[in-house]
Image: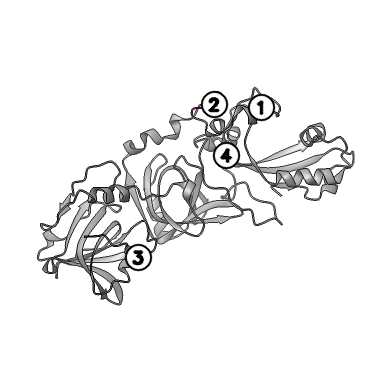
């Protein structure tokens, strides 16, 4: 037999099909008619999920799901309409069967509950392994889409009376955004104000930290159970971009699953933080991707390559670093206003990398050195250099 994708199951009314999916919602058992319902999704379906109704002879024969995020195999379930909703019906009287598996990566292929008629095939193990890994990394997220995310909670912060942000990280870098807003100054962070330095020092200094906005009552009640350092799996999270910054929100079908901390031991940011030390290229992605031929031509070639988060959290007030950054905005925009009344270059830039955004200023001799200006009045040359910095 073959497994049908859940999105195709919605088109298979009155047919018997085989399905495999991640459980995202649990319903209560109905003791009066020995039935229960749940919802499942798979990597190709990012909606609210396909309802599955189970009907059995006794309560003990109904599925006893241990956790949202577990995986279920369904054999010969019939696609029907129940209360005008497409539903998969699993009934032993119609030769249907099911098997429940732990959703955590790396565990065995033995179901913790199954129907007597269920038979596990060798190729089913591949389906199970793939589904256990059907979580998107932050590096692969797409604007306007829902995805599943396996991540570490770095910080939780209340920003308004009724709004919270959950800061999460998975060790990868979110893709750079197209900056569409040019008329107003871009913010440095998603939250209303940047967190103080002592809090930022608890953040990993490589990889991107995603902000998840929580403003619904039900969501706020859920985050009371969360703590920094916990590893969670978030199902059906919605990703969006605002002012060139990634953020995410819960959807009505978003579910959360706790994961044992031992699964993320090799993933912990504490293993990679080296306060006050020169970052080694082994743990610094920026240093790894820069060849010696590209690292020359800048001042202070003895300074280490670091991320902007390294700079924000550095324990000394003044220091010298080298960074690979993107210029996303400069002030003033009008090159004719680039010099003050004394003829000195005066420029404020917003820089970003995968870890943070910062303000950077250039003034007088440092500005002339940066632009290589022999004549500050040569507006055409300055415009060309500014456009090159901004990717124009």
Q: In this orientation, which residue lies closer to the viewer: 87 or 203? A: 87
Mark 4 crowd level (few <14, some 14–19, many ≥20, 10 Å Cα): few
Query: Spatial distance from mark 4 to mark 1, Cα to Cα?
Result: 21 Å
Considering only order in the chain, which callout, 2 or 1, is on the residue closer to the N terminus? 2
Q: Which mark is residue 320?
A: 1
Q: Where is residue 37, by image quadrant? A: bottom left
Sequence order check: which comes first, mark 2 or mark 4? 4
Helix, strand, or loop for circle 1? loop
Q: Identify the residue at image location x=44%, y=46%.
A: 137
| Local secondary structure at mark 3 | helix
The tag earlier along the polypeptide, 3 or 2, is 3
Q: Which residue sits at x=32%, y=71%?
A: 11
Q: Are marks 3 and 2 in contact (CB under 8 Å)?
A: no
Mark 1 neighbour density, 10 Å: few (under 14) some (14–19) many (20 or more)? few
What residue does disc 4 label? 196
Mark 1 and mark 2 residues within 8 Å of each other at the beta carbon: no
Answer with left or right where residue 135 lies relative to residue 51: right
Image coords of residue 280 (percent x, y) = 52, 25
Give the magenta part as a residue range. 274-282
Query: Is label 1 or label 3 in front?
Result: 3
Q: Mark 1 and 3 residues: CB-CB less than 8 Å, in contact?
A: no
Q: Which residue is mark 3?
A: 7
Disc 2 target residue: 279
Is 319 covered by the magenta stretch? no
């Amino acid at each position: 037999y073959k497994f049908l994708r859940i999105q195709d199951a919605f088109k298979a009314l009155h047919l018997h099909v085989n399905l495999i999916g991640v459980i995202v919602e649990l319903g209560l058992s109905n003791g009066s008619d020995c039935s229960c319902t749940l919802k499942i999704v798979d990597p190709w379906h990012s909606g609210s999920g396909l309802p599955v109704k189970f009907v059995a002879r006794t309560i003990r024969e109904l599925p006893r799901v241990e956790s949202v995020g577990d995986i279920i195999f369904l054999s010969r379930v019939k696609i029907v309409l129940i209360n005008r909703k497409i539903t998969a019906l699993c009934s032993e009287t119609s030769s249907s069967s099911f098997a429940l598996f732990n959703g955590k990566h790396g565990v065995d292929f033995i179901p913790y509950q199954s129907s007597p008629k269920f038979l596990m095939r060798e190729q089913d193990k591949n389906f199970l392994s793939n589904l256990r890994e059907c979580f998107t990394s932050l590096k692969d997220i797409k604007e306007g889409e829902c995805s599943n995310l396996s991540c570490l909670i770095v910080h939780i912060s209340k920003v308004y009376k009724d709004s919270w942000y959950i800061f999460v990280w998975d060790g990868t870098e979110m893709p750079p955004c197209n900056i569409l807003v040019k008329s107003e100054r871009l913010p440095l962070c998603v939250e209303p104000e940047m967190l103080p330095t002592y809090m930022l020092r608890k953040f990993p200094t490589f990889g991107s930290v995603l902000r998840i906005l929580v403003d619904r009552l039900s969501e706020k009640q859920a985050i009371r159970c969360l703590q920094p350092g916990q590893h969670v799996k978030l199902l059906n999270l919605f990703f969006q971009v605002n002012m060139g910054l990634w953020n995410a929100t819960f959807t009505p079908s978003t579910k959360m699953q706790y994961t044992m901390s031992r699964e993320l031991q090799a993933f912990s940011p504490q293993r990679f933080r080296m306060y006050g030390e020169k970052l080694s290229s082994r743990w610094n992605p920026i240093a790894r991707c820069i060849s010696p031929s590209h690292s020359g031509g800048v001042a202070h070639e003895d300074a280490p390559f670091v991320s902007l988060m390294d700079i924000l959290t550095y324990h000394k007030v003044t220091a010298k670093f080298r960074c690979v950054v993107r210029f996303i905005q400069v002030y003033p925009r009008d090159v004719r206003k680039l010099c003050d009344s004394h003829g000195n270059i005066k420029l404020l830039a917003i820089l970003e990398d995968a870890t943070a955004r910062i303000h950077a200023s250039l003034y007088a001799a440092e500005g002339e050195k940066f632009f290589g200006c022999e004549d500050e009045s040569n507006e055409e040359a300055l415009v060309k250099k500014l456009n090159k910095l901004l990717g124009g």
